[in-house]
Amino acid sequence: MNSRTIRLVSWNVNGIRAIMNKGFPEAIRQLDPDILCLQETRADAGTVMDIAAKTGLYKCFANAARKKGYSGTAVLTRIPPAHHQMDMGRAEHDQEGRLITLEYDDFILVNAYVPNAGQELKRLDYRKAWDRDLADYLSVLSKKPLVLTGDLNVAHEPIDLARPEQNYNKTAGFTQVEIDGFKNLLGLRMVDTYRRLNGDRVQYTFWNQRFNARAGNVGWRIDYFLVSESLAG
């Protein structure tokens, strides 16, 4: 793996069964990733693996929520990992299929679908605990360089959403609690690769389906690749 570039792609599919009817296999062939990380699969592991088989050439690891049709993550990989793990080993967090860890020869990959703080921030206390425990989990994995990717459900800085003043400490994804949780990940000597490569360029990864938000580019950057500083070059 040292001798070539590895192409990684992360994608919140918002339902893997639904996206199969919207050109998903064709998109994967065009993107041609070595490792594809999916979030919000919304299907049981068997269904995800059956669908993944139709994309060809990938081994699939799928983690499903106990609640049907909710949350879920998957990793499709051409490169065989040495080890894999579902969840983070904490019962309070291991019910929703939100985490998959794969260990490769040169790095450890963590695919995450971080819980949303919810309407009226009803789940913000839980989100705070999740962020803390995720940072603890990642710190234990630091025997190798880390790649953390996925829908982290937070805009780190005002530049990462279209209307920061209207949303700060009012809307899930842009509270100080969530921002601090993200900063704790960077404190593990991890780099936000998009910001490192693109400086102050504005680009979003999520648009609310309501209010015609995508047409007006009223978006959020909540999907990330964070990597250990040793990989940032």
Image (cartoon, rainbow, N blue to C red):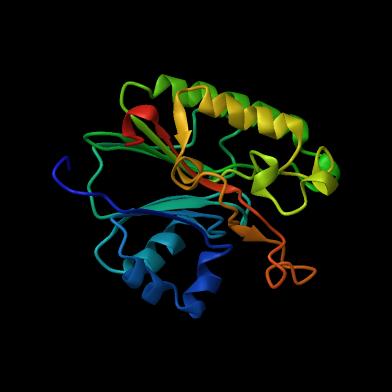
Q: Position of residue 182 (x, y in %)?
A: 60, 32
For the residue pair 68 and 131, the one nearer the viewer reads as 131
Task: Give the residue furthest to the front.
Answer: 200
Q: Position of residue 123 (x, y in %)?
A: 77, 38
**What residue sits 53% from the left and 45% below the top?**
97
Q: Taking 223 as reference, is 230 left or right? A: left
Residue 54 at x, y percent in the picture: 34, 72
- Give the percent coordinates (x, y) of residue 62: 42, 51
Is 191 on the left-hand or right-hand side of 219?
left
* Residue closer to the observer: 149 or 159: 159
Q: Name the residue located 52 percent from the left edge and 72 percent from the top edge.
A: 19
Residue 54 visible in the snapshot = no
Look at 75% across and 72% down and name the residue there: 212
Above or below, 184 relative to 16:
above
Which quarter of the figure is the C terminus placed in?
top left
Quadrant for the N terminus in the image:
top left
Residue drawn at point x = 82 percent, y = 39 percent: 122
